[in-house]
Image (tube, rainbow, N blue to C red):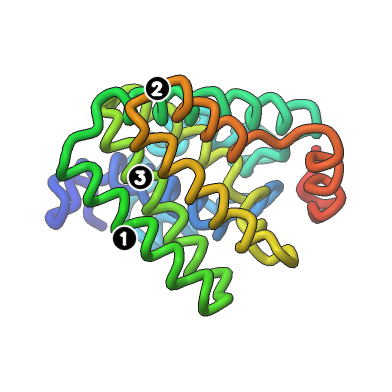
Amino acid sequence: MHDSANPQSGLTLAAHIRQTVIDDLSQGALAPGMALDEQALCTRFQASRTPVREAMLQLAAEGFVTAGSRSGVVVPKLSIARLRELLELLAEMEAAAAKFATRRLDAPARAALRAAFEHCEVAAAAADPAAYHDANDHFHQAIYEAARNQMLAHQIRILRTRCAAYTQDRFESPGRIGRSLEEHRHLLAGIESDDPARGHAAMLEHISIGGRDFAEFVSRLPPAYVG
């Protein structure tokens, strides 16, 4: 067993386990309600129980998992009300990032944002949901980097991770890729406009899920995901 550090990243082993589980959550590999088996994690990371338990405690404190004496460590299920709250908060924080990006956009950030949008166009033309999902993530990442506010970007990533299992298949819906691409086009224009209010509004329109859209979104969720 190796309990000191992950030599490739320089992280302690507990930190490495924590980050890997977060990556799994972000990619939708861990479904709501799924239990994380301690022994399986020990085997996966060639670790004793101590760093695994330390990582689980950190993840529980951050809200990524829940830990109980009987249930063990479980990926939490979100109620419809809590999911709406998280998505509303995410929309506001993404909009703030777009506002800052509009205000602080320089030539390198503009080039990165346009390149990310072109990747979205390629994935949309191929009608490939998985490729578009990745391109979408890169487009939003370019906005966070342009915003130059690391604390805001960190909080957005936390919210995105907590919602990831619920939004993983959103581009499978008929017509959703095309609509998203047009929203990205509108958002790109807003951020390049030098009008922070326009960038903010464009992102809010892109991210917000309300009314009929939210009802449609909820109707596609696997029943087992809802707590």
* Residue at point 79%, 52% (across, down): 221
The reply, left or right, for residue 52 in relation to residue 71 is: left
Amino acid beneath label 1: Gln
Which residue corresponds to mark 3? 141
Find disc 2 in the rendering and name its residue: 196
The answer to whether residue 118 is above or below residue 139 is below
Q: Position of 75 compared to 113: left or right?
A: right
Q: Of circles 2 and 3, which is in front?
A: 2
Left or right of residue 19: residue 214: right
Q: Say which residue appears at 62% left-offset and 62% top-offset.
A: 178
Q: Label 1: which residue?
A: 46
Which of discs 3 and 1 lies nearer the camera? The answer is 3
From the image, which quarter does the C terminus lie in?
top right
For residue 61, say whether it is visible. Answer: no
> In the image, is 153 to the left or to the right of 11?
right
Residue type, mark 3 in image: Gln
